[in-house]
Image (cartoon, rainbow, N blue to C red):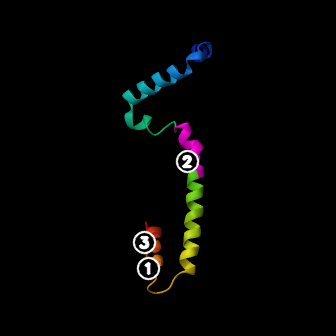
Amino acid sequence: MQKFISENQHQFGYIMQEASRQWIKKNPSGALTVGTCNAFIEHYGSYHQILDKLERYEEVLKDIAKLSKYEGNQWYENLKKVLED
């Protein structure tokens, strides 16, 4: 297989599309969880980068919530609901 691929580099797109098609046919849910689209990664970052950012944002929101905590503050109450999820 490796030799075939190395001898047919001009057809990488076709090879990848065919491999993807067969994988989807054999295991639809598994095939859709692998191989993130390059455009998505370029825009948002990798899965782990997104998780790291999310973790940092959550910590900042918790700090903001502590600073704005007072009875009747509707913004604080809404933020508290988001952080509980």
Q: Residue at x 37, y 27 (%)?
A: 25
Q: Residue at x 49, y 37 (%)?
A: 34
Q: Which residues are magenta?
A: 37-49
Crowd band around label 2 with a 10 angstrom C-alpha radius: few (<14), some (14–19), many (20+):
few
Element class at badge 2? helix
Q: Earlier in the sequence, mark 3 or mark 2?
A: 2
Q: Is residue 12 above or below residue 36?
A: above
Residue marked by disc 3: 81
Say what amino acid the circle numbered 1 marks.
Gln
Q: Position of residue 54 (x, y in %)?
A: 55, 59
- In the rendering, which numbered label is found on residue 74? 1
Q: Position of residue 66 (x, y in %)?
A: 56, 79
Say what amino acid the circle numbered 2 marks.
Tyr
- Tags 1 and 3 in contact by the CB under 8 Å rule? no
Q: Is residue 68 above or below residue 13?
A: below
Q: Position of residue 65 (x, y in %)?
A: 53, 76
Provide the major secondary structure of the magenta segment: helix
Q: Residue at x 54, y 80 (%)?
A: 68
Q: Name the one closer to the observer, 42 or 84.
A: 42
CA–CA distance in space, label 3 to label 2: 25 Å
CA–CA distance in space, label 1 to label 3: 11 Å
Residue marked by disc 2: 47
Crowd band around label 1 with a 10 angstrom C-alpha radius: few (<14), some (14–19), many (20+):
few
- In the rendering, which numbered label is found on residue 8? none
- Residue 35 in magenta stretch: no
Element class at badge 3? helix
